[in-house]
DNA sequence: TCTGGGGTCCTAGGACCC
DNA sequence: TCTGGGGTCCTAGGACCC
């Protein structure tokens, strides 16, 4: 059977989320900022038209923002996560097989609708999502994932398509590839685009005419798969079940630079606990824990120092208390006084399912107790949708916390500011 | 001019994505 | 003053073994 996939993605997702609960923002330029209000990570169409680029530092466009009355928001991931769930729920009504690809993108298997009017069906999907969630989406339909991506991009770009494009006929596919620039292909980043242009390959169509072994030699098996996908041969399966993560990382720049160990310690402990929660959510444990610290690389006059330390845990764990304990040991081994620290982070690797951990006969940790405690912590945090229970090392200090002065309310989730400390 | 060879495992680094 | 934070996969090359 011929396969047909749709790629559905939310238009300017974070900006659209801000709009859903504040309709007066419709038609107004909006940007959403990264953590610490650092740079632009989402823009409404109006903001794009003002020439605001993705990833631009906020301070560099502050004048423009004021002059043009651009609404700037700190990122509100609780809100975006919740809105994402609503969109995905809605999409899953239209086909039994979907792959959640990212917070704002989803592949839908439409092979069963081969004989239907796919254009009409795609429009029905688009209209329903808008009606039920308030989020505008675009759909590209084609025989492979890479082609669906191409279709989606054109669906957004073309006035005629207006957000929905079905690429089924070979001549339509060919035309779409001819107007797609090489750097706009999913899987071709800056390096490969430069390389391919050097070899006179400027469009997706020209890429499909390239030699298989030449592509594999220079772009690895990944490039070869992409080549075949663009020719219509499916190489990337729909992944309906999200595989457990193989690495988990929590890191953030501090609101202001820190020199004192104590505050870096609190921040790092907090990141370790966040990692623990992510681990438990996917019912895994980790055996390797890495802590890193960084000074501000943009600040040339500051003395620079970056370092990291990895610790092999005696027994794989997902307990906050243990993760914090080892993160602290690692941090102490790399912290050096006299530097202006800007960022630290915790990375967990060698991740395995909770029920496959190897116990150690000399283990002194009461794992049953830890497990029960974590269950309670998670259920409380789940109910109040934030970290209301913490290990004392995480501290009460706020000096290292993120700057987020422009955050919208968490419209869809409740907020309760209760802090309970345990040791 | 010649310097064994083949297999496996691990890691660092590079490419990409949203 | 102010410059994000997560992830994925693949390959080359070194270490080590027989």
Image (tube, coloured by chain):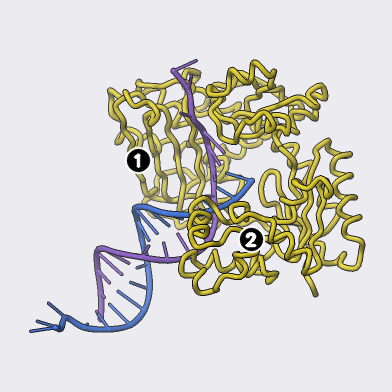
Chain colours: A yellow, B blue, C purple
- Residue at disc 1, secondary structure: strand
Residue at image position (50%, 74%) is: A213
Tell me residue A169's x, y (percent). Answer: 81, 68
Could you tell me which chain the residue with mark 1 belongs to? A
Mark 2 — residue?
Answer: A204
User: In the rendered view, would you say A234 is above or below A40?
Assistant: below
Closer-to-camera residue (A318/A367): A318
**Distance CA(mark 2)–CA(mark 1):** 41 Å
| Mark 2 belongs to chain | A
Position of A134 compared to A306: left or right?
right
- Residue at the spot 34% in from the left edge and 42% down from the top edge: A309
Query: On the rendered structure, is A336 left or right of A286?
Result: left
Report which quarter residue A204 is drawn in.
Answer: bottom right
Is residue A354 at least partly visible in the picture?
Answer: no
Neighbor class of circle 2 (other Cα within 10 Å; few <14, some 14-19, many 20+) is: many
Labelled disc at residue A409: none
Tell me if mark 1 has few (under 14), some (14-19) or many (20+) residues whose alpha carbon lies within 10 angstroms of its own: some
Q: Which residue is mark 1?
A: A308
Instruction: Please tell me which residue lies in front, A78 or A43.
Output: A43
Question: Can the viewer see residue A328 in this picture?
Answer: yes
Give the quadrant of the N terminus of chain A. Answer: bottom right
């Amino acid at each position: 059977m011929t396969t047909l996939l749709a790629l559905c993605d939310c238009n300017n997702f974070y900006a659209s989320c801000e709009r859903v609960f504040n309709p007066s923002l419709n038609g107004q330029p909006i940007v959403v900022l990264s953590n610490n209000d650092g740079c632009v990570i989402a823009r409404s169409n109006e903001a794009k038209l003002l020439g605001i680029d993705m990833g631009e530092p906020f301070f560099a466009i502050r004048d423009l923002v004021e002059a043009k009355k651009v609404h700037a928001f700190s990122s509100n991931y609780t809100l975006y996560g919740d809105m994402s769930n609503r969109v995905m729920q809605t999409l899953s009504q239209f086909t039994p097989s979907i792959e959640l690809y990212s917070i704002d993108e989803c592949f839908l298997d439409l092979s069963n609708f081969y004989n239907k009017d796919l254009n009409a069906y795609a429009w029905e999907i688009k209209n329903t999502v808008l009606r039920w969630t308030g989020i505008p989406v675009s759909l590209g339909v084609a025989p492979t994932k890479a082609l669906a991506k191409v279709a989606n991009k054109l669906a957004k770009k073309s006035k005629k398509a207006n957000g929905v494009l079905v690429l089924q006929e070979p001549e339509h596919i060919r035309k779409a590839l001819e107007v797609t620039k090489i750097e706009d292909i999913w899987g071709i980043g800056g390096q490969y685009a430069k390389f391919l242009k050097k070899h006179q390959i400027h469009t997706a169509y020209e890429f499909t005419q390239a030699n298989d072994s030449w592509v594999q030699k220079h772009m690895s098996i990944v490039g070869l798969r992409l080549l075949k996908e663009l020719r219509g041969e499916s190489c990337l399966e729909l992944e309906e079940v999200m595989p457990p993560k193989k690495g988990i990382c929590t890191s953030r720049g501090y609101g202001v630079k820190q020199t004192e160990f104590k505050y870096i310690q609190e921040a790092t402990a907090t990141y370790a606990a966040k990692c623990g929660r992510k681990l438990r959510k996917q019912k895994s444990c980790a055996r390797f824990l890495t802590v890193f610290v960084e000074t501000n690389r943009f600040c040339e006059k500051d003395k620079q120092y970056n370092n990291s330390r990895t610790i092999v845990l005696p027994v794989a764990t997902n307990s906050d208390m243990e993760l914090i304990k080892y993160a602290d040991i690692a941090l102490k081994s790399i912290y050096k006084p006299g530097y202006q620290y800007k960022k630290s982070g915790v990375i967990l690797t060698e991740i395995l399912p909770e029920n496959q951990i190897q116990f150690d006969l000399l283990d002194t940790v009461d794992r049953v107790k830890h497990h029960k405690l974590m269950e309670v912590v998670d259920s409380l945090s789940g109910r109040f949708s934030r970290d209301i229970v913490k290990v004392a090392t995480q501290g009460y200090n706020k000096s290292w916390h993120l700057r987020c002065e422009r955050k919208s309310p968490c419209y869809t989730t409740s907020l309760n500011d209760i802090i309970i400390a345990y040791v």
